[in-house]
Amino acid sequence: MKDREMIARLRDLRRRREDRAREEVIKRHAALDRAAREGRQAASAVTEHLQRTVDAEDAAFGSLIGHRIKAASLHQLQGRFEIAARKTEQLRENEKMAGVAEQQRQAELSAARNDHREAMKALTKLDGVLEHLINRTARRCLALAELSEEEERGPTRLSTER
């Protein structure tokens, strides 16, 4: 196998590797977009829950104004508020986890981009080597053609000079 053929095959392999690296970047980018969307949804859920909780507290305390307050009704309100607080903590934990997942996806995307960049560099180097070999071969063929042309003309010039 000639050098040019071997380099061409190696270039094809590296082209496939670069294609796979590009596909991986696309996948990682989509995963990052999903993680970012989930993070926004988690933050929105916390905000909405807090707003509903504040509205429920205001309504509950508003209903107590001007009425006799019993210990049982206060314990009932306290139980609702504790449930709401636990739900808020759970939603905040989900929001935190979504943020961590987004950071992980960002790191994975960065690594995939680096891999793709390296694959592109390797492919570009082989393209340069292959182009150089093609040019060198073309110059060599041109030189051989000129030499053979001169050799063909050589005896005819000598016979006419005599």
Image (tube, rainbow, N blue to C red):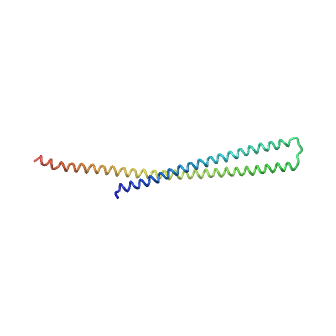
Query: Which percent across, then down, holds residue 16?
Result: 45, 53
Q: Quadrant of residue 50?
A: top right
Residue at 31%, 51% in the rendered image: 137
Query: Which percent across, then down, holds residue 128?
Result: 39, 50
Count of numbered badges drawn on the protein: 0
Query: Which percent across, then down, holds residue 91?
Result: 70, 50
Residue at 24%, 48% in the rendered image: 146
Query: Which percent across, then down, holds residue 93?
Result: 69, 52
Q: Is residue 134 left or right of residue 71?
A: left
Q: Is residue 30 left or right of residue 45?
A: left
Which of 13/106 is in front? 13
From the image, which quarter does the N terminus lie in?
bottom left
Looking at the image, which residue sits at the far left? 162
Q: Is residue 141 left or right of residue 7?
A: left
Looking at the image, which residue sits at the far bottom? 1
